[in-house]
Amino acid sequence: NNLGVIYKDTDNLPRALSCYEAALRIKPTFPEALNNMGVVFTIMNLPEDALPYFNSALQVAPAYAEAYTNLGKLFQDAGDADKAIQYYERCLSLCPFSDNAAHNRLLALNYSLRHSRNSVTAAHTAWGQDISSRAANAA
């Protein structure tokens, strides 16, 4: 699985898939490898191949926050901002300091037809205040 991440990060997606498949042959219920297969298929713009892997990762590990973020990204890329927001919010309920999910949620809010301009502005303001507060506390 770790070697697959290196291949993914260097854009060698076929080799990444091979590594994740090897990991899954050893342990078919390895949630990180299942999730990473979904990530690669998402990068390859193959959402119909990615979705079952994300769902399998969450079936094995329902509290796997990163898989919810990746599902959100899949739906965001497909143009379903509201469904993406639901997945980002699920991730944030499990892992409140997931900056990736929080940032992607804010981006998706801008494209949602269900959220008013004022609620989107309020969400951006709250996120900015949270980041500022965390930065001040870390200093």
Image: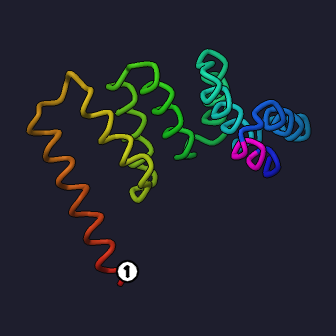
Identify which residue is drawn at 17% across, 53% down: 125
* Image: 126 above or below 139: above
Q: Residue 126: percent from the left, percent from the top?
A: 19, 55
Secondary structure under tag 1 reads helix
Q: Is residue 10 left or right of residue 65?
A: right
Which quadrant: the C terminus?
bottom left
Q: Quadrant of residue 113?
A: top left
How many marks can you see?
Answer: 1
Identify which residue is drawn at 86% across, 41% down: 23
Give yes or no for residue 48 being in the magenta stretch: no
Q: Residue 46: percent from the left, percent from the top?
A: 63, 18
The residue segment tinted magenta is: 5-10
Give yes or no for residue 7 being in the magenta stretch: yes
Identify which residue is drawn at 36% across, 47% down: 103
Under mark 1, the amino acid is Ala
Secondary structure mostly seen in the magenta stretch = helix
Q: Which residue is mark 1?
A: 138
Q: Residue 41: percent from the left, percent from the top?
A: 66, 26
Crowding at dot 1, Cα within 10 Å, few <14 / some 14-19 / many 20+, comes out as few
